Image (cartoon, rainbow, N blue to C red):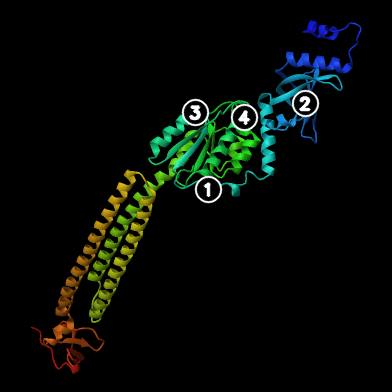
């Protein structure tokens, strides 16, 4: 190259000197041909962010330095704001700034070097977006309760997509998957992921209601900090926040955190966990239907046991003159309880039927529809069985109460007195059951069926 450069300086007429501009132009052309794409590594010093949007700085390796420029058309793709003292790896082309005759590198991409530098860049972006409140909980959209169509933004060849596909295929029957393929690693990966999110939102704006994507899973499997760096880009974070489709971030392993995790509507520790979140609603619906059915069975059992217990209490309650009235009162209470029980069960069954009908209209799988129909038939049978059981209990209780009333009437002390018997009491009101308990000339009181007699004992005689 040196010989070519010298040759270019002396081409032409030997007696015509070159201008400085001509020399700089030829040197620039020669350098740009020879160094059209180079990678350099060094420390940033004298960094300046100009008002025009361009960046200017110097790369230093301890022994030498090289001026660098990163124009606005290129630096928007860089994931963070450089600063003095940061060790970086840059890609660009060598050129010459002709007005000053200085050669420099025109930077096209810039990456921090080492885990420490990546952490600094990560914290820088996190702090900036945090100040703009992009991570606030009130901005996060709720996930749909029962998503029908799930978009997956990831590499079609990665393990993440296969994990998601496996979980959703195994756990759900009505969820369809839309793969939006993109690279998830490399210099342009962040921009491709952003474009995939924008594409999904544009699709939803034009699609019919039944064709729209309900939720997006954006992620990939685990890797090093550099492998996951695409999900830390500021432009991607802003696209996630601006998305009208709720987004689940599923990047790396459980211990890996990216900017996408903070800004997404929901963070899943792994792609498989993201799929579990999506499938959770369908499982919850099945569990909900099963639990409501068990609750209805338990409620019916409780009502029947409670009614039987009340009847037993009535049968064993103490009785006296007020018992017939109490029997009538209890009968009214039982009738009222019966009416309330039937009305309560009818209302609950009607609500359960309505909820089951609503769930059946929302659930498309044949298996769930069959379950709902089976539950409705069982509930209808139980309704008839319950009504018949309550009627049978009430009728049986009426018969038992009539028998008990007749028995109590036959055993009533008043009924015995009406047959000619009497009750003798001493002056203190104690009942006399033996002649040995009374003495001659002692006053007694004789209780008959329709009143009392006061008498005096003339003499006693023992049989």
Which quadrant would the C terminus be assigned to in this image?
A: bottom left
CA separation in Å, label 3 and label 1: 27 Å
Q: Earlier in the sequence, mark 1 or mark 4?
A: 1
Crowding near the residue tagged with mark 3, few <14, some 14–19, many ≥20 C-alpha atoms within 10 Å = some
User: Mark 1 = which residue?
Assistant: 142
Label tally: 4
Q: Nearer the viewer, residue 150 or 6?
A: 6
Q: Residue at x 64, y 33 (%)?
A: 233
Compute the Cα span from label 4 to label 3. 19 Å
Disc 1: CA contacts within 10 A as few (<14), some (14-19) or many (>=20): few
Residue lying at the far left in this picture: please name it: 463
Residue under pointer 2: 69
Check whether the beta carbons of the residues at disc 2 and disc 1 lie within 8 A of each other: no
Picture residue at 49% right of the left edge, 26% below the top: 157
Distance between the Cα atoms at labels 2 and 1? Answer: 44 Å
Q: Provide the residue designation for mark 4.
A: 229
Q: Does residue 121 appear to the left or right of 457 in the view shown?
A: right
Q: Position of residue 342 (x, y in %)?
A: 29, 66
Instruction: Determine which quarter of the picture holds residue 260.
Output: top right
Give how far across and how far down residue 217 sits, in percent: 51, 37
In the figure, 207 relative to 307: above or below?
Answer: above
Q: Secondary structure at mark 3?
A: loop
Closest to the observer: 173 or 345?
173
Q: Which mark is residue 156?
A: 3
Residue 63 visible in the picture: no
Circles 1 and 4, Cβ within 8 Å, touching? The answer is no
> Which residue occupies the foreground of this view, 168 or 330?
168
Which mark, residue 32?
none
Residue 300 spot, x, y in % from top left: 29, 59
Residue at image position (32%, 56%) is 296
Crowd tier of the residue under label 2, counting other residues whose Cα lies within 10 Å: few below 14, some 14–19, many 20 or above: some
- How far apart are the alpha carbons under marks 2 and 3? 37 Å
């Amino acid at each position: 190259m040196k010989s070519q450069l010298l040759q270019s300086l002396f081409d032409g007429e030997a007696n015509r000197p070159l201008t400085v501009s001509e020399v700089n132009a030829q040197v620039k052309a020669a350098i740009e041909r020879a160094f059209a794409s180079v990678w350099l590594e060094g420390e940033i010093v004298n960094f300046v962010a100009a008002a025009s949007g361009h960046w200017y700085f110097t790369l230093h390796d301890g022994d030498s330095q090289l001026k660098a420029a990163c124009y606005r058309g290129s630096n928007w793709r860089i994931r963070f704001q450089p600063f003095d003292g940061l060790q970086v790896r840059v890609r660009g082309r060598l050129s010459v700034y002709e007005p000053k005759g200085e050669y420099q590198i025109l930077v096209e991409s810039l990456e921090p070097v080492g885990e420490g530098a990546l952490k600094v860049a990560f914290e820088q972006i996190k702090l900036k977006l945090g100040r703009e409140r992009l991570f606030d909980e009130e901005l996060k959209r709720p996930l749909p309760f029962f998503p029908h169509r799930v978009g997956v933004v990831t590499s079609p060849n990665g393990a993440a997509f296969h994990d998601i596909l496996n979980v959703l295929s195994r756990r759900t029957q009505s969820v369809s998957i839309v793969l939006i393929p993109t690279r998830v690693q490399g210099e342009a990966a962040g921009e491709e992921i952003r474009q995939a999110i924008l594409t999904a939102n544009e699709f939803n704006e034009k699609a019919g209601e039944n064709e729209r994507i309900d939720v997006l899973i954006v992620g990939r499997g685990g890797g090093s900090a550099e492998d996951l760096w695409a999900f830390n880009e500021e432009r991607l974070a802003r696209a996630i926040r601006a998305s009208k489709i709720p987004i689940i971030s599923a990047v790396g392993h459980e211990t890996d955190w990216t900017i996408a995790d903070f800004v997404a509507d929901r963070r899943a520790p792994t792609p498989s966990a993201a799929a579990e979140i999506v499938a959770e609603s369908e499982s919850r619906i099945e569990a909900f239907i099963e639990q409501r059915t068990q609750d209805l069975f338990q409620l019916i059992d409780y009502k029947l046991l409670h009614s039987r217990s009340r009847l037993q209490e009535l049968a064993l309650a103490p009785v006296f003159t007020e018992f017939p009235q109490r029997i009538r009162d209890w009968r009214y209470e039982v009738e009222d309880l019966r009416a309330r029980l039937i009305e309560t069960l009818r209302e609950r069954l009607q609500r359960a039927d309505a909820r089951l009908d609503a769930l059946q209209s929302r659930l498309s799988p044949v298996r769930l529809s069959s379950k709902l129909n089976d539950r409705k038939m069982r509930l209808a049978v139980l309704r008839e069985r319950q009504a018949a059981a309550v009627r049978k209990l009430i009728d049986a209780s009426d018969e038992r109460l009539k028998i008990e009333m007749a028995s109590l009437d036959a055993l009533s002390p008043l009924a015995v007195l009406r047959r000619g018997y009497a009750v003798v009491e001493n002056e203190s009101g104690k009942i006399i059951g033996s002649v040995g308990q009374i003495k001659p000339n002692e006053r007694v009181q004789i209780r008959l069926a329709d009143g009392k007699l006061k008498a005096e004992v003339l003499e006693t005689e023992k049989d």
